[in-house]
């Protein structure tokens, strides 16, 4: 598997939120809900990240009906999430293994 740089927590939650079409405010709301308000994304952060993710091809704009523009994750974005989940699982598994004293 190709190595990728770690995702920031904000980008991770933006990508997760976009498994369904959402606009920026919807992303902010879902992230706060999922993290019990631990992660609060500001409007500036969200729209800067959306531009970057669009440029990378990790998300795409969904046909908007004149209201708020919505976005959705692409297959490339899903690959990035899957890679990040496996990276985080490795971190977690190694942390548990070492801190619980099972060094085998």
Image: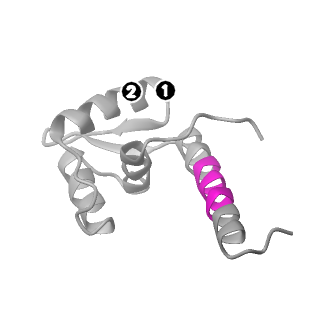
Q: Which residue is mark 1?
A: 56
For residue 52, which numbered disc appears in the image?
Answer: 2
Residue 29, x across and y down, in percent: 21, 59
Above or below: residue 26 compared with residue 67: below
Q: Nearer the viewer, residue 64 or 77?
A: 77
User: Are dots 1 and 2 in contact, CB under 8 Å?
Assistant: yes
Say left or right for 58 vs 34: right
At 49% from the left edge and 26% from the top edge, which residue is drawn?
56
Which residue is at the far top? 55
At 16% from the left edge and 42% from the top edge, which residue is drawn?
68
Residue 20, x across and y down, in percent: 38, 57
At 40% from the left edge and 43% from the top edge, which residue is drawn?
11
Residue 80, x across and y down, in percent: 58, 43
Q: What is the CA distance from the residue labelled 1 to the residue labelled 2?
A: 6 Å
Say left or right for 3 vs 77: right
Which range is magenta? 83-92
Disc count in the image? 2
Residue 85, by quadrant, is: bottom right
Examine the structure image and report whether residue 74 is included in the region drawn in magenta: no
Residue 66, x across and y down, in percent: 14, 38
Say left or right for 25 vs 62: left
Q: Nearer the viewer, residue 49 or 67?
A: 49
Q: Nearer the viewer, residue 103 or 28?
A: 103
Rendered-image quadrant of the C terminus:
bottom right
């Amino acid at each position: 598997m190709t190595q990728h740089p770690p995702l920031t927590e904000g980008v991770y939650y933006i990508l997760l939120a976009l498994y369904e079409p959402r606009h920026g405010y919807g992303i902010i709301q879902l992230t706060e809900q999922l993290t019990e308000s631990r992660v609060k994304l500001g409007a500036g952060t969200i729209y800067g990240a959306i531009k970057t993710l669009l440029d990378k091809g990790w998300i795409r704009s969904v046909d908007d009906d004149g209201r708020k523009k919505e976005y959705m994750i692409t297959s490339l974005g899903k690959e990035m999430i899957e890679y990040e989940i496996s990276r985080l699982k490795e971190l977690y598994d190694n942390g548990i293994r070492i801190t619980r004293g099972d060094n085998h």
